[in-house]
């Protein structure tokens, strides 16, 4: 693969910098790619996945926007970009390979330039889970990615995280309840 966009569009797995750690992701519309990611990561499908985007509009194919009460809209949108993953109502028909055992979807808008460029080039969000095998420490740089993981990744974006000291906080976007 010659670029992150080509890898994304052909169903490849991509390692890329997020706010705090390196992420592992793929095209959320490509079910086979998501199943490959879950297998590589050794992550149970029931847990669900995060979608990372450059803008809220890129998440509208996945979030049931009409279920966000009008009086909550400003609060939800004002939490972005960066650092806050919000669990919001999922659109009907979204694959359980993304939502897991839930009827919600975890989403985040970021300002990390490499992710913004990729999402804008494809006009889609990217699946985002930490670039590590389940139970291992997430990599903070592309140089510290687990060699066993690197063998299974199609493209590595050799950028830098935004320098946050911990992964995103995960909250219920409508109630504010903190999950992580």
Image: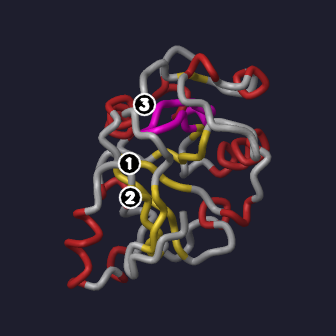
Q: How is the image coloured?
A: secondary structure
Q: Is residue 34 magenta?
A: no
Secondary structure at badge 3 equals loop
Quarter of the image with the C terminus in it: bottom right
Q: Assess disc 1: are there few (<14), some (14-19) or many (≥20) residues with their C-alpha within 10 Å of its C-alpha.
A: many
Decide if residue 161 is on the left or right side of residue 30: left
Seen from the viewer's position, the closer of residues 43 and 4 is 43
C-alpha separation, residue under disc 1 versus residue under disc 3: 15 Å
Any mark on residue 59, and which?
2
**Which of the marked residues, 3 or 2, is nearer the chain's N terminus?**
2
Element at badge 1? strand
Instruction: Give the mark nearer the N terminus: 1 vs 3.
Output: 1
State if disc 3 and disc 1 touch (CB < 8 Å): no
Identify the image quadrant of residue 118: top left
Q: How many C-alpha atoms fall within 10 Å of the one at disc 3: few (<14), some, or many (≥20)? A: many
Q: Are marks 1 and 2 in contact (CB under 8 Å)?
A: yes
Measured as percent of width and height from the top left, residue 112 is found at 35, 36
Image spot of residue 27 (x, y percent): 54, 44
In the displayed structure, does residue 27 sit left or right of residue 55? right
Distance Cα–Cα, label 1 vs label 2: 7 Å
Q: Nearer the viewer, mark 3 or mark 2?
A: 3
Disc marking residue 53? 1
Q: Earlier in the sequence, mark 1 or mark 2?
A: 1
For the point 48% across and 53% down, the residue is 51
**Which residue appears at 55% of the width and 27% of the height?**
7
Can you tell which mark lies on residue 74?
Answer: none
Give the residue drawn at x 68%, y 38%: 137
Q: Which residue is mark 3?
A: 161
**Magenta residues, as a range?**
9-23
What is the spatial separation of the Cα atoms under label 3 and label 2, in whole angstroms? 22 Å
């Amino acid at each position: 693969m010659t670029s992150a966009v080509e890898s994304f569009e052909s169903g490849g797995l991509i390692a890329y910098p997020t706010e705090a750690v390196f992420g592992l992701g793929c095209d959320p519309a490509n079910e086979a790619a998501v199943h490959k990611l879950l297998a590589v990561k050794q992550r149970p499908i029931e847990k669900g996945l995060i979608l990372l985007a450059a803008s809220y509009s890129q998440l509208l194919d996945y979030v049931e926007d009409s279920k966000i009460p009008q009086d909550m809209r400003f609060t939800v949108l004002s939490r972005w970009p960066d650092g806050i993953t919000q669990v919001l109502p999922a659109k009907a028909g979204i694959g359980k390979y993304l939502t897991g055992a839930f009827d919600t979807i975890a989403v985040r808008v970021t300002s990390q330039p490499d992710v913004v460029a990729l999402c804008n080039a494809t006009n889609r969000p990217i699946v985002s889970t930490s670039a590590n095998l389940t139970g291992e420490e997430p990599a903070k740089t592309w140089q510290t990615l687990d060699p066993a993981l690197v063998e299974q990744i199609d493209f590595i974006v050799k950028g830098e995280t935004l320098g946050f000291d911990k992964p995103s906080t995960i909250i219920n976007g409508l109630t504010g309840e903190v999950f992580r």
